[in-house]
Image (cartoon, rainbow, N blue to C red):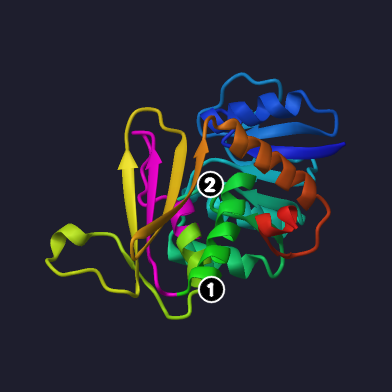
Amino acid sequence: MVRFILVGACGKMGRVIADIVSKREDCEIIAGVDKFPKDCSFPVYESISEITDKADAVIDFSHPSALDDLLNYSAKTGTSLVLATTGYDDEQKKKIKDASKVSPIFFTYNMSMGINLLANLAQKAVEILGDGFDIEIVEKHHNQKIDAPSGTALMLADAICEVTPNPMKYEYDRHSKREKRTKNEIGLHAVRGGTIVGEHEIIFAGRDEIITLSHSARSKEVFAVGAVNAALYMAGKEPGLYDMKELID
């Protein structure tokens, strides 16, 4: 039985994960962390430092501000971290990379298997199409999402840049300038409205033809299932930085 600590236990994603784990026989949640504790089937603490029971992995669906406490906890206890929170800045991403030298950390911008397959397909498209197609990424999320563009959109753009023949730059704000599109840019566009769970579209626009790759999440459960599977995978792992490629491969 794999034992988890769930950070952000009382939030929307935390409740979904708790429901999924409760129906499985290979794992259990032994404790939760939330700044606003509520009644759960497991004890919930305001700080992860208050937890004394040993866990095999920590699943984090909370807020970027919790990162330092999580990294300190992992370094102190040797517990694997699954970081499913979005909105980390560049300094925090560096902290994650540095911490992975002493702690086992699973970090991805999106826990959906489908999204990570989409990134692989986009790379394949670039390898076949070359530089003859302009690339645009459109992401859509609910009206409560704070960061834009989404971490997933940036992940997709980064994946594309790994295989493009020429260096690319990201364009977020075309309305502020009056000039034609350059070849070495990827446009990123954010839509916010209603209860959209998450939609991502990669457009390859060439001469007289358009190729579109897309993914649509219909519920938060796809991300929760991915996070639980990642935590099961990370139990007992050696220090290092892991991502969804390990699960797909």
Callout in the foreground (2, 1):
1
How far across and how far down the image is residue 234, in percent? 77, 52
Report the residue at 24% width, 69% height from top: 181
Q: Nearer the viewer, residue 209 or 54?
A: 209
Report the residue at 23% width, 59% height from top: 173
C-alpha distance separating marks 2 and 1:
26 Å
Q: Nearer the viewer, residue 21 or 132?
A: 132
Secondary structure found at label 1: loop
Outermost residue to the right: 1
Is residue 149 covered in magenta?
yes
| Residue assigned mark 1 | 163
How far across and how far down the image is residue 242, in percent? 69, 60
Label 1, residues with CA under 10 Å away: few <14, some 14-19, many ≥20 = some
Part of the protein shown in magenta: 131-155
Outermost residue to the left: 178
How far across and how far down the image is residue 232, in percent? 78, 44
Say above or below: 10 vs 7: above
| Residue assigned mark 2 | 85
Q: Nearer the viewer, residue 211 or 198?
A: 211
Label 2, residues with CA under 10 Å away: few <14, some 14-19, many ≥20 = many
Give the side of residue 210 with respect to residue 127, left or right: left
When asked about the image quadrant of residue 29, the answer is: top right
Which corner quadrant holds the C terminus?
bottom right
The amino acid on which the numbered mark 1 sits, given as a three-letter code, is: Val
Give the side of residue 47 with respect to residue 23, left or right: left
The amino acid on which the numbered mark 2 sits, given as a three-letter code, is: Thr
Residue 140: mark in rendering:
none
Secondary structure found at label 2: loop
How far across and how far down the image is residue 23, in percent? 77, 23
Which corner quadrant holds the N terminus?
top right
Report the residue at 49% width, 62% height from top: 92
